[in-house]
Amino acid sequence: MSPTNAVTRLAAEVGEAAGTPVELERPSDAAHGDYATNIALRLAPQRRQSPRDLAQELADVVSQSPRVERAEVAGPGFLNLWVAREWYRDALAEILAAGSDYGAGWAAPRERFQVEAVSANPTGPITVASARNGAYGDSVARLLSFAGHHVELEYYYNDSGAQMELFRESIEAVRRGEELPEDGYQGDYVRELAALDKDPVPRMLEQIEASLERFRIHFDSWALQSELQRRLPEILPKLDTYEQDGAVWARSSDYGDEDDRVLLRSEGGRPTYRAADVVYLRDKLERGFDHALYVLGADHHGTRNWYAAVARMLGYDPDRVEVLLYQLVHLTRGGEQTKMSKRRGDVVFLDEFVDEVGVDAARWYLVSRGHDQTIEIDVDLAREKSEKNPVYYVQYAHARIAGILRNIEGAEPTADPPGELAREERDLVKRLAEFPGVVAEATERRAPHALPNYAIRVADDFHRFYHHHRVIDEGEAQPFRLGLVVATKAVIARGLDLIGVEAPDRM
RNA sequence: GCGCCCGUAGCUCAGUGGAAGAGCGGCGGCCUUCUAAGCCGUUGGUCGGAGGUUCGAAUCCUCCCGGGCGCACCA
């Protein structure tokens, strides 16, 4: 399922001629037309026809369409299309009618998604590494929601594991003026929490929530490991388990995981985090979510198959569980790599990073790389680089349009071109018409980094248009150009919103 | 040793079977005109390597090299 729009409707016309669905692409070389398809090359073998002959037959049919200016056969059998003025008018009219909803609501069926993201232990402030988790997970959530799904974002935190004990012990040690436990938590924030003379965990959680809200990530709910763990006795019998060496194991290797996993430790029968995972997953699916998405750093990729195995063991369709992995953030200082460790206090916190570069540049930066790509951040260069961050290039396009609109308040936009379109106008309309396809693909591939890359292209086409053509006082061209920039503004604003970046009216 | 991810321009990275790209950097131009955080030109790549599949491979398969991350009764 993907949204219908001017491009897919044109593809459908070609598809009708070909008798099979057709996808159109925009050739990088303008000499290859506005749109092109390789359908003749794919169909030729089964039709026992030469690709070029087949392409020519399609060209003859398709060129009859009022939306097609001309159609040509090129190379081994590509079909290149030049679209007509009518197509541009249709495409722009559709965007103006939809406004900020352009590209929205295409999902069918509409389902309920839970996205669990960040979920860092409250043993310290949110780091830049966790911020990537949040930026990625939140953007995926925004995309799913924009598609028409019901989406809730949840933060799951561990308040009872070994790391938390070590954290509390570290605080206590500082309070008593004793030496830190082995591998204990260090850093300024530990001393500050120790000075408060209160339970450090609620304080830490408040700070985490505040940092994430500032980063424009709002969590709908917060889940607590200790609470979920209490329901373990009720869930445990539903699992395929066995005892060995005094511990209780899940037979997860029979359900698609690499190994069996310990649920209850031999020492005192204390539950592992995986025991809580089982309760939590069941809770998610029983709460009425069709899909449970886990956003995990690559350092957790070993647990990738664990969640699906648990779903199988509990009798759920494992396809309802999805693990979204992203690669880690590496920090360097003046070329030297620093390890991100909260325990050693050797770490860059999100708040510091945002103080340096701002929310917009930070979110853009963390989500504009593919999630399978390791991110390198040179902390010393972060600020300097932020001034050259492409996010400003995109935002500037939006601000320029806002400036135009301020100067001609009340003027009526139209999608109807007064005459032949200029090259910059055609390029911009075609670019905007890509938006629904970009959004749909980004959503289905869980790949929000397509948005910033696309937004740069839009800004590119806009800035070029802006440089070559005026909007205001251009006589009969004004209403159409106004429509063009109004549509551009809507697409840029939405594209940025989907990755949590603001679209300012002035810069 | 096993598993996952990555290797594309000087740097940071897009591009998941169709005709090699962007930003930054470098060099040279453009502001009495809706915002110069902009525009135009130019510089730049044996797509890590070798085989294979295909009419066609940066993209799919195999092997090799290099880097990252894992392989807990931590999370």
Image: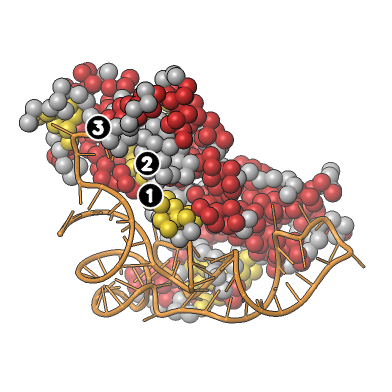
**In this view of the protein, can residue A276 be seen by the observer?**
yes
Identify which amino acid the numbered label 3 is placed on.
Answer: Arg
Indicate whether A338 appears above or below A245. below
Q: Position of residue A66 (x, y in %)?
A: 64, 63
Indicate whether A411 appears above or below A314. below
Q: Is residue A73 left or right of residue B68?
A: right
Tell whether label 1 touches label 2 (CB within 8 Å). Answer: yes
Q: Is residue A60 left or right of residue B17?
A: right
Identify which amino acid the numbered label 2 is placed on.
Answer: Arg
Front residue of A322 and A480: A322
Q: Which residue is mark 2?
A: A344
Tell whether label 3 touches label 1 (CB within 8 Å). Answer: no
Q: Position of residue A500 (x, y in %)?
A: 56, 42
Tag on residue A274?
3
Q: Which residue is mark 1?
A: A339
**In this view of the protein, can residue A370 be seen by the observer?**
no
Sequence-wise first label, 1 or 3: 3
Q: CA distance from mark 2 to mark 1?
A: 9 Å
Front residue of B38 and A104: B38
Q: Residue at x 41, y 20 (%)?
A: A199
Q: Residue at x 46, y 64 (%)?
A: A18
Element type at marker 2? loop
Indicate whether A333 appears above or below A114. below
Q: CA distance from mark 1 to mark 3?
A: 26 Å
Q: Residue at x 75, y 61 (%)?
A: A466
Q: Circle 1 marks a residue in which chain? A: A
Q: Position of residue A172 (x, y in %)?
A: 36, 24
Sequence-wise first label, 3 or 2: 3
Q: Circle 3 marks a residue in which chain? A: A
